[in-house]
Image: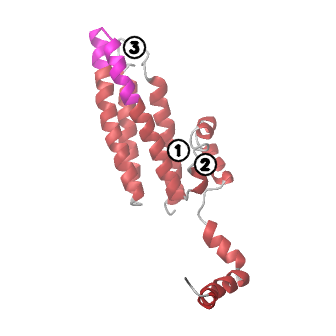
Amino acid sequence: MASPVRFISLALPLVVTWACFPSHIAAIRFENKADVALVQSLCNESQDPDFCNRTLATDPRVEAATMDGLALISISLTIDQVQTTSDSIASIRGQVSDPIGKQRIGVCQADYTDALRQFRGAFSSSDAKAYWDVIDRVRDGTNKVIDCENIYKRDPIRASPISVDNHNVFKLSELTLIIVDKILPH
């Protein structure tokens, strides 16, 4: 057991430092945390602030996150969306009977497989703070989802059975790019 003298000799300098410089200690401790106002400003920069408020702003991890953490959270949300959509494509594919519909949903399945790989790579790059690579990977993953959306706009034009999911990926990608833009030096 540590002696009281030993404890005081270790704790006293910390207490004195805190007492002399409380605002500096607080600034160091909370300097990079994402507060409500910051997250709200990020949401307001997006094309769909309500979507941001329902997804990113309500994620429990946001409260303790730095800007770097917000980038990871937004990419994680995107990965979850892409995985969920990819899983639903398999069941949709089984319900489609016409050859054009089967071909289109097959393209979407391949596009979502590629998109998932890109977003997972973006997560790893973000974790390594390689933000230019994050931008490239988010762009490439989003382009795959755009390809899936656009295949239904070719003749014969039909509504995509996963259009809402595609647009959610677009919105989540936008949030990631907004956050990364704030992290990168200008």
Alpha carbon separation for disc pair 3 and 2: 35 Å
Rendered image: mark on residue 175: 1
Q: Amino acid at mark 3?
A: Ile
Magenta span = 85-104
Magenta segment, prevailing SS (helix, strand or loop): helix
User: Which residue type does callout 1 highlight?
Assistant: Leu
167 to the left or right of 43: left
Q: Measured from the top left, where is residue 123 in percent x and y?
A: 40, 50
Can you tell which of label 3 and label 1 is closer to the viewer?
A: 1
Q: Secondary structure at mark 2?
A: helix
In 3D space, how far apart are the residues under numbered discs 1 and 2 (Cα atoms)? 8 Å
**Which of the two discs, 1 and 2, labels the residue nearer the N terminus?**
2
- Mark 2 belongs to which amino acid? Leu
CA–CA distance in space, label 3 to label 1:
30 Å
Disc with the residue nearer the chain's start (3 vs 2): 2
Left or right of 45 in this view: 117: left
Question: Mark 3–mark 1 contact, CB under 8 Å?
Answer: no
Task: Inspect the magenta stretch and tell me whether residue 87 lies in it.
Answer: yes
Q: Is residue 133 visible?
A: no
Rendered residue at 46%/28% (across/down): 165
Q: Which residue is mark 2?
A: 42
Which residue is at a point 45% across and 40% down the rendered structure image?
Answer: 78
- Say whether residue 119 is visible: yes
Callout 1–callout 2 Cβ contact below 8 Å:
yes
Instruction: Tell me where residue 95 sits by quadrant.
Output: top left
What's the mark number on residue 157?
3
Image quadrant where one finds the N terminus: bottom right
Q: Nearer the viewer, residue 41 or 67?
A: 67
